């Protein structure tokens, strides 16, 4: 298909011309990365010359996109046309489409509005965030469209030399970058798409990183339960099996998945989620099992999130549910992962050897650096 731009606008005397051809039909619009796509069926005519699409460009100037090629024969009334119009902002754009014959006749204007998605690189860059970590920085991005991109992080290393870390990805993900100064440092992020097109802007971040001396056992004041797959509300007195028991600093209480005395089991996986109220750079989680218990789950996973919608998976771990473990904290180090977030989930994934369908946890703790301290 041959497409080209003409830098003139629709002339003021269009309405005075004799309209001798019918209008275009089935005009539709579709948003795409960095462009707006219009499709339509041309008028039935033996002498179709071209079709003009009139609109305002990103600077508010009159612009025209002209189409001179199409699929099918206009004389039959069945010829398809498409205009792929580049657009770098996400403003609503009004398009007016007019067909012209070789003798100068024109069709009645048809209008439609459309909005472009950001370019592929901007689309991913919009989701990127960089957070301070203990001894490094954590880079996060969302890529639910499976776009092949490179995330480029530029900063000064410990020697003061500008360096870049390039992360190739086609999924939602994260990266822990070590060897950055603990002093105030600037970080710049760009995204490059599969066609080597760089994002139209760079995201800028500036902060100190954390040291091991900054790590604390995070105070649970202000913590709330953000989700749970089930909880026991009839049995397990005197505290019952409420999810809130897992963050109440009371080792005698515990969260218990639903069982209702064995009449209504909730089955694996079992999930409990917490809103810490602020973003935390997490160095380790710890769990404490229920007192005198020998039948909780034996494997679980940890997740973190900034928005309680997009989640980052930090792997599966073993849980010692036997009597020998007592009620000591069982630690799960995150030092090789950029485990940063306001929200976290613990998901019990596998039952104990007895195969019972429930689980229970007395207490959950987090170690790290709250970003509001």
Image (spheres, helix red, strand yellow):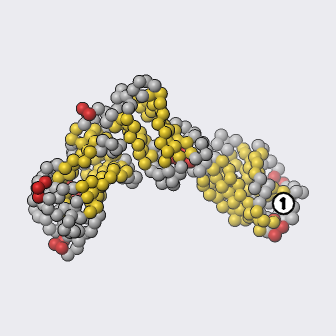
Is residue 125 in sight in this rendering? no
Q: Looking at the image, how many numbered discs can be counted on the residues?
A: 1
Of 116 and 191, the residue lying toward us: 191
Specify whether 205 is left or right of 271. Answer: right
> Please, which residue is most extreme toward the top here?
160
Instruction: Please say whether residue 321 is visible from this viewpoint.
Output: yes
Query: Which quadrant: the N terminus?
Result: bottom right
> What percent of the width, then of the height, locates residue 125?
50, 43
Residue 216, above or below 110: above
Q: Which residue is mark 1?
A: 48
Q: Position of residue 41 (x, y in %)?
A: 74, 64
**Residue beneath the point at 84% across and 54% down:** 16
Element type at marker 1? strand
Q: Give the x, y percent position of residue 75.
A: 84, 67
Residue sitting at x 30%, y 41%: 335
Front-most of residues 36 and 181: 181
Dividing the image into 4 quarters, which one contains the C terminus?
top left
As drawn, the residue found furthest toward the right would be: 103
Q: Nearer the viewer, residue 106 or 136?
A: 136
Residue 161 vertical position relative to residue 140 in the rendered view, above or below: above
Q: Residue at x 24, y 55 (%)?
A: 318
Q: Residues within 10 Å of mark 1 (few under 14, many from 20)?
A: many
Residue reaching furthest bottom?
263
Q: Residue at x 50, y 51 (%)?
A: 170
Q: Is residue 170 left or right of residue 319?
A: right
Percent position of residue 115, x then y: 60, 52
Residue 46 is drawn in which quadrant? Answer: bottom right
């Amino acid at each position: 298909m041959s497409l080209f731009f003409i830098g003139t606008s629709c002339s003021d005397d269009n309405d005075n011309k004799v309209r001798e051809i019918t209008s275009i039909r089935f005009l539709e619009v579709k948003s795409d990365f960095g462009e707006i796509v219009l499709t339509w069926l041309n008028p039935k005519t033996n002498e179709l010359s071209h079709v003009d699409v009139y609109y305002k460009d990103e600077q508010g100037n009159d612009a025209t996109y002209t189409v001179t090629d199409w699929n099918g024969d206009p004389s039959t009334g069945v010829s398809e046309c498409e205009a792929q119009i580049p657009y770098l902002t996400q403003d609503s754009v009004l398009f007016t489409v007019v067909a012209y014959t070789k003798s100068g006749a024109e069709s009645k204007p048809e209008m439609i509005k459309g909005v472009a998605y950001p370019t592929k690189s901007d689309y991913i860059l919009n989701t990127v965030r960089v957070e301070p970590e203990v001894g490094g920085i954590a880079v996060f991005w969302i890529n639910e469209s499976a776009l092949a991109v490179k995330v480029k992080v530029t900063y000064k290393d410990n020697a003061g030399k500008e360096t870049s870390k390039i992360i190739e990805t086609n999924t939602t993900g994260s990266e822990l970058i070590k060897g950055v100064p603990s002093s105030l440092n600037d970080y710049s992020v760009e995204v490059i798409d599969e066609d080597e097109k760089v994002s139209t802007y760079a995201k800028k971040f500036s902060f100190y990183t954390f040291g091991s001396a900054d790590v604390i056992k995070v105070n649970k004041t202000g913590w709330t339960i953000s989700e749970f797959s089930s909880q026991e509300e009839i049995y397990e007195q005197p505290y019952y099996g409420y999810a809130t028991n897992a963050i109440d600093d009371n080792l005698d209480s515990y969260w218990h998945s639903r069982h209702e005395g064995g009449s209504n089991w909730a089955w694996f996986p079992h999930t409990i989620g917490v809103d810490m109220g602020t973003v935390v750079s997490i160095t380790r989680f710890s769990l404490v099992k229920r007192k005198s218990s020998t039948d909780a789950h034996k494997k679980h996973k940890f997740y973190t999130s900034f928005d309680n919608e997009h989640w980052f998976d930090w792997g599966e771990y073993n849980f010692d549910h036997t009597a020998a473990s007592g009620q000591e904290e069982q630690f799960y180090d995150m030092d090789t992962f950029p485990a940063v977030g306001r929200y976290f989930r613990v998901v019990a994934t596998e039952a104990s050897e007895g195969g019972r369908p429930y689980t229970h946890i007395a207490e959950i703790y987090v170690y790290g650096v709250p970003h509001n301290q």
